[in-house]
């Protein structure tokens, strides 16, 4: 068994990050914009616009992408290369990011459950991971 090809992890991770950032834009700046603004208003806050906030979200999209492809590469020896393993990876990431965060935010009363956001996050996690895994090859 060979080690993880970190060059390909970064390359695939960047692609996954682009896909993740595109989903984030479509989800939160188009589909959920009014719901997100209403949630922030209920908290007594306003939605931050552009600048450093946007840079942080974009960078985190790329960090997510790299982490997704790294996890795919790590579990690939057990499950085999391919779309099925990439989907499993995306589902695991969805569980550890969106499901966990949704439970915490809802339980604390910070945000109401939003099924649309939940489903969009699921699709984004899986599609971004599959895209990034497509570029991953062992050394």
Image (cartoon, helix red, strand yellow):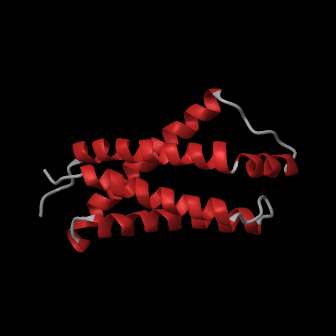
- Looking at the image, residue 112 sits to the left or right of residue 115; the answer is right
Classify 17 as above or below 73.
above
Q: Residue furthest bottom?
A: 79
Residue 102 image point, x, y percent: 66, 64
Residue appearing at x 72%, y 35% in the figure: 48
The residue located at (80%, 63%) in the rendering is: 109
Q: Is residue 74 above or below residue 128?
A: below
Residue 92 point in image, percent of width and height: 44, 67
Is 98 situated left or right of 81 in this image? right
As drawn, which residue projects farthest toward the front?
Answer: 31
Q: Is residue 59 left or right of residue 134?
A: right
Frontmost residue, 28 versus 109: 28
Which image quarter: residue 52? top right
Task: Give the quarter of the image for residue 119.
Answer: bottom right
Picture coordinates of residue 57, whole percent (x, y): 57, 40
Q: Quadrant of the N terminus?
A: bottom left
Residue 65, how many percent across, how many down?
Answer: 41, 48
């Amino acid at each position: 068994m060979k080690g993880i090809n970190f060059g390909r992890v970064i390359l695939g991770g960047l692609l996954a990050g682009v896909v993740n950032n595109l989903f984030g834009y479509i989800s939160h700046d188009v589909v959920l914009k009014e719901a997100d603004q209403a949630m922030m208003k209920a908290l007594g806050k306003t939605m931050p616009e552009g600048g450093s906030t946007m840079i942080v979200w974009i960078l985190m999209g790329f960090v997510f992408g790299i982490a997704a492809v790294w996890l795919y590469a790590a579990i690939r020896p057990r499950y085999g290369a391919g779309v099925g393993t990439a989907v499993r990876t995306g589902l695991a990431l969805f569980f550890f990011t969106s499901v966990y965060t949704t439970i915490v935010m809802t339980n604390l009363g910070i945000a109401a459950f939003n099924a649309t956001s939940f489903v969009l996050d699921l699709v984004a996690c899986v599609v971004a991971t599959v895209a990034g895994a497509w570029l991953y090859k062992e050394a």
